[in-house]
Amino acid sequence: MSVGRENWGSRFGFIMAAAGSAIGLGNVWRFPYITGTNGGGAFLLIYLGIIVAFGVSLALAEMVVGRTAQRNPVGAFRALGGARWAGVGFLGVFTGFAILSFYIVVAGWTLAYIVQSLRGGLHSTDPKVLEAAFGAFVSDPVAPIVYAGLFIGLTAWIVVGGIARGIERWNKILMPALFVILLVLVARALTLPGAAQGLSFYLVPDFSKVSTRTFYDAISQVFFSLSIGMGTLLTYGSYLSKQENLPSAALTVVLLDTCAAVLAGLMILPAVFAFGFNPSAGPGLTFITLPAVFASMPFGAVFSVLFFTLLAIAALTSAVSILEPMVAYFVDEHGLDRRRTVIVAACVCFLLGVPASLSFGLWNGFTLFGKTWFDLMDFLSNNLLLPIGGLLTALFVGWAWAQPAAHHLSNEGKLHQPWSPLWLFVLRYVAPLGILWILLSSLLK
Ligand code: PHE
């Protein structure tokens, strides 16, 4: 065990940081548009079903592994399961790079939209105008890349600051603020004339739209949104003291993340219908719809600045949690200097982000397997690496390390947990079979 390893300042701090990791672009940007392209209500139901079936159990599994080993993903799997399992940790470190490459691009858009709102641009409720403005911005060969660079720079700055004073302090203030403003915007969206159609699209399931693809997109979204499958929750758990009650912390984090996603859907989808946008517009959906919501409310410009600022911050707290596991790996296992590691890792992510940004303009035509670099990185991490990481974690905790897992989960028997056999059952059978079935049925089609 590493001596002098930093810890969270408090249990609340840990929960806020883990929630800060979970709540990010996945909730506000990705969830509404994935729901939109998958036909609405039925997708929401399947998404929630997967969270209940094994999302919570997997989040908890990662936290237990991390807290027990008090190490980064590679070190933790190696310490608890031997060299054979270290690969799961490596997979996570690799996944972090893939995710950040497109994450910083979208996060950069949020920064740009703060500036735009400050300038009073984007003031329109006309879909054509807003779509054109978004298209013109993201296809620019320079500006979005500069914003992405700025964003990864900010992320690196926080990660250099360390755990309690860097990551924890910010999350404690900003997460509650984000929820408040989400609620205000939901209230506005729901009272727009024509919102009802969007509401029924979102809440009334139409099962004729369900295919294997729906399950596949839902499972990817669950992993991405809950930050599971790449060792983020594991790493955050590793900074937690051994007295905390993990199950309740895990449940709180999952609940907060799910509320944020459901609220984001309630904010975007009614507005999509009220203003006549196309719900399957893809990655631009949030960025073209929200300005219309702002333009239709009193003090819209103020809300716009506030909202994109909070979204950028939510993205920042998530990006920090994607960067931290790989940094922890190089620092713990190779004894590298933290600051230098952060800088190098951030530069690599930035370089990977350049083609992702150019995917919307200059390099739009360069595709691999029919996907641009941006889509490829999104697909690779969300549709393959995270579910595979989650599958292996479930197999590790459910089969290879089951007895110690239950023991450590209960703080060496101090907590009464009559349901822990159920948790292990989920990790043994439900999660692996569920993930495998969804992956194989979509990929082999
Ligand atoms: N959960 C984050 C979001 O919703 C993204 C993330 C994925 C963070 C994987 C950490 C690990 O934006």
Image (cartoon, grey):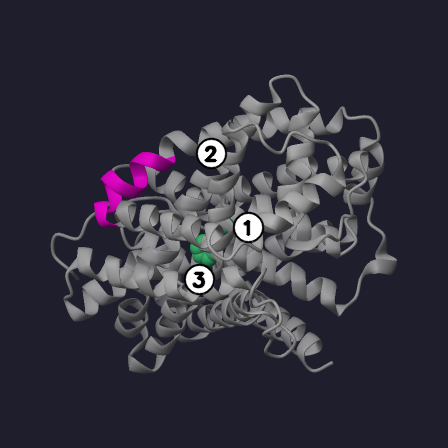
Q: CA distance from mark 1 to mark 2?
A: 16 Å
Where residue 160 appears, as percent x and y from the top left, is 23, 49
Would residue 168 be counted in the magenta stretch? yes
Q: Nearer the viewer, residue 25 or 51?
A: 25
Cβ of mark 1 under 8 Å from ligand 1: the answer is yes
Q: Which residue is mark 2?
A: 309
The disc, 3 or 2, on the residue closer to the chain's N-terminal end is 2
Tell me the kind of residue under disc 3: Gly
Can you identify the residue that label 1 sits on?
Answer: 26
Q: Is residue 248 visible?
A: no
Magenta span of residues: 160-171
Locate residue 289: give its quadrant: top right
* Residue 215 vertical position relative to residue 192 in the rendered view, above or below: below
Apparent side of residue 354 relative to residue 75 in the rendered image (left or right):
right
Q: How far apart, in angstroms, are the residues tagged by discs 3 and 2?
A: 21 Å
Q: Secondary structure at mark 2?
A: helix
Q: Residues within 10 Å of mark 3 (few under 14, many from 20)?
A: many
Marks 3 & 2, CB-CB < 8 Å contact: no
